[in-house]
Image (cartoon, rainbow, N blue to C red):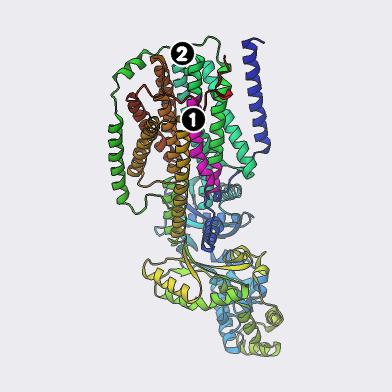
Amino acid sequence: MNRAVRRWTLLVAWLGALVLLGAWSVLNLRPSTDLSQFLPRGVSQQDQVLLSQVRSGVAARTLLLRISAINATLNSEALADASRALAERLREEDAFLEIANGDLTAAAAGTDPVLFQYRYLVGPPAHCADALNASTLRDALEQRLDELASGLAMLDKQRLPEDPTACYRQILLSMAPDQRPSRRHGVWFSPDGQSALLVALTSANASDIAAQRRAISAIEDAFGSLPEHSALRLELAGPGYFAVSSEQQIKTETLLLSTAASLIVALILALAFRSAALVALGILPLASGILVGALLVSLLYGSVHGITLALGVTLLGVALDYPVHVYAHTAGTDATGRRAVWRTLLLGMATTVLGYAALAWTSFQGLSQLGVLAAAGLATAALTSRYLLPRLLPAGYQLPERPWLTSLQSRLPRLSRRSGTILLLASSLVLGLALSVQDNPWETDIRRLSVIPQSQLDKDSAIRAELGAPDVARLLYLIEENQAALLERLEAARPDLEGLAMRGLIGGFDSVDRWLPSPGIQQARQDQLPTQDKLTAALASANTELPFRLERFQPFIDAVQASHSLPPLRVEDLADGLIGTRTGMLLTAFGERWLGLVPLSGVVEGAGVDALNDIAERHGMTYLDLRDGTAKLLSDFFTEVLEKLLIAAAILLVTLALALRNSSRLAQILLPMTIALVISFLLVLLVHGSANLFHLVSLLLVAGLAIDYSLFLSRPTATAADRQRSLFSVSVGAGSSFAMFAMLSLSAIPALNAIGFTVAAGILCAYFFSLLLARAAPDSLQWPQASPLLGSDTPMHRDYAD
């Protein structure tokens, strides 16, 4: 079989394998959209409560809607009509548990059969269990008569025969938030009256992007069906909306920026090698790495997160360096020279893979997936470049001459190792000063660990402020063995919390015991209910000289009598009602015990927090600030990652030491990398103010690239031509990688911007200092003849083209 046939056979086989892997991915790969995979796994009980609220709490399920006029042709009354029409349509959708816009008529129209049945056991006593004597019934009937005369009875007129004391109405009112926005024309409005406001509580968690996408589509479709929608503007905010919009935005920006970067990289490679065939072949190792990495992650984790896949593909873009090294060193190099190049390439790959492998140990499943995907993909790209690409190179291909490289190499200054060490110490000192003025260099605000543009976060804050709900991230919680004990402790704490609200230390609070008292309270109210005869007599006395017909109130008398035999109401009984999910979010199973939550709003810093901690201590509760809690969790996570990276760095150092077996050459490799990392980290702090998760991932990549550049630029060579080829391959690889990540740095998405900026800055530092320090490397440095890791007598280093 001649060389041409072997080349085509190998190419067809490689392409066939990629097609099979691609087909398997299409049929079996399950992209995950659960954003909670990018949260750490909690260890303590408080961590678990914290993460449950971040993932599926009330705040995580809430969507905020704002309707405003595009021009001045619509007045506030038209906006109110649009708000009512939109709310009415959305209440018919299964995607929502609750739609609130301040419309009391709509709020009172719905009836929860179970809650209505139990109203005299669970409702506010003044309007329910305590309102069943002659004098209170008289007051209630007179109030209903006034409402009928004024027209306000439309709120619950249909329930008058069964509920003349408006007990059920008071239960609904007790569920309303303590802090409410201003109202105009019967619905919520912004303080300036320019926008109508709505709040939607979704059935699905914010992390279920598919369900959130359906909910948002339902909102947009309902809005689009409004008669005057073309003159209106709809704005959305909230975790679910961010999850959907950021997913789409990251896909769009990644596609656009990656396409632009790919075109630039292809142009650079085409100009460098003057061969369209080589540019096309260079894609195969990258494609192999992506497919193998995704396959491995899918087998290990059951699915691949969409963000993991997008970021993994981005990070694997540097795998294009491997074909560049192969192209530059295969043509015009003898077998001995090529074996030395392969050792350098494989050693550079091994060190970078070790850095990525450290991510697989983290508590973030999404980040762990990213580590596995990047490490496996990079190894695959390097190995296919080493063992397959040389066989596919066109016969007789010669590297184009680049005389400017010789000129550049001769004019570059030399940076001695001593000067490099001084530079490292100086930059480290500046970094130390920058760190000293910050309490914590790590970004621990979970909202910034995001793909969410700052403009979206600002809009969310503005709508929350207009709704009068500036604080949704604080709560009290307690855990008990059973529902009854938990409800009793919530009831005991309520007077203290009401006292804080009266003193203005908190804006308000929400507690399930407002409409679900403990079994003991329910039993006490049940015992005080009047008999049928006493209630009939009291009602007759109350109706004296009033126009009501007593026989119309027989359903009311029957309901009170039926309440005598009801068992205590439980969370499970409300599961299928209007407030079932809301109840379940405030009182829920927690392992074999029960978790009770008391969301707080308008907490005053200092005095309010201190008072809440006192109440928590008295009643066996725990005060939890979700932002502070997640900040601590993320801070602990960074500590954990740094510890593991130190272990990875130690392994990397040992690997290089065993491979090189020369302390001088080891120092020559590590010095540029360390300088590049220090300066890159310093630039991140100066430009972004703090380093987040994505900066950390990027610094790992910078370390790998710096080692790769140093290995090739300071590689012992026999001729000036070899040095020129190394300079050429590193320059082309660094230029193409820089172009790719510089494009990402233009993204408005914080995650992509962080990765792009950090890696682009790191590439410049790594290339520049590797090049300058390599100029000072003594030619006497040689590869060990029998390295225990990369010995040249192994089949791994025999050139396949020979």
**Would residue 461 be visible to someone looking at this image?**
yes
Total tally of numbered discs in the picture: 2
Say which amino acid is labelled 1: Leu
What residue is shown with label 1? 347
Seen in the image, is 542 located left or right of residue 426?
Answer: right
Residues in magenta, as a range = 343-370
Instruction: Give the answer, above or below, for where 381 lies relative to 3.
Output: below
Residue that appears at 38% across and 38% down: 677
Viewer-nearest residue: 562 or 401? 401
- Looking at the rendered structure, the secondary structure element under dot 2 is loop
- Magenta-colored stretch includes residue 362: yes
Instruction: Give the answer, above or below, for where 307 lies relative to 275.
Output: below
Q: Which one is earlier in the sequence, the residue at label 2 or at label 1?
A: 1
Viewer-nearest residue: 412 or 310? 412
Which quarter of the figure has residue 417? top left
Say which amino acid is labelled 2: Leu
Q: Main secondary structure of the magenta part?
A: helix
Quadrant where the image shows the N terminus: top right
- Looking at the rendered structure, the secondary structure element under dot 1 is helix
Circle 1 Cα neighbour tier, 10 Å, few/some/many (<14 / 14–19 / ≥20): many
On the image, the x and y values in percent for residue 487 come to: 58, 74
On the image, the x and y values in percent for residue 501 come to: 43, 73
On the image, the x and y values in percent for residue 450 come to: 47, 47
What residue is shown with label 2? 399
**Would residue 451 be visible to someone looking at this image?**
no
Residue that appears at 56% across and 52% down: 206
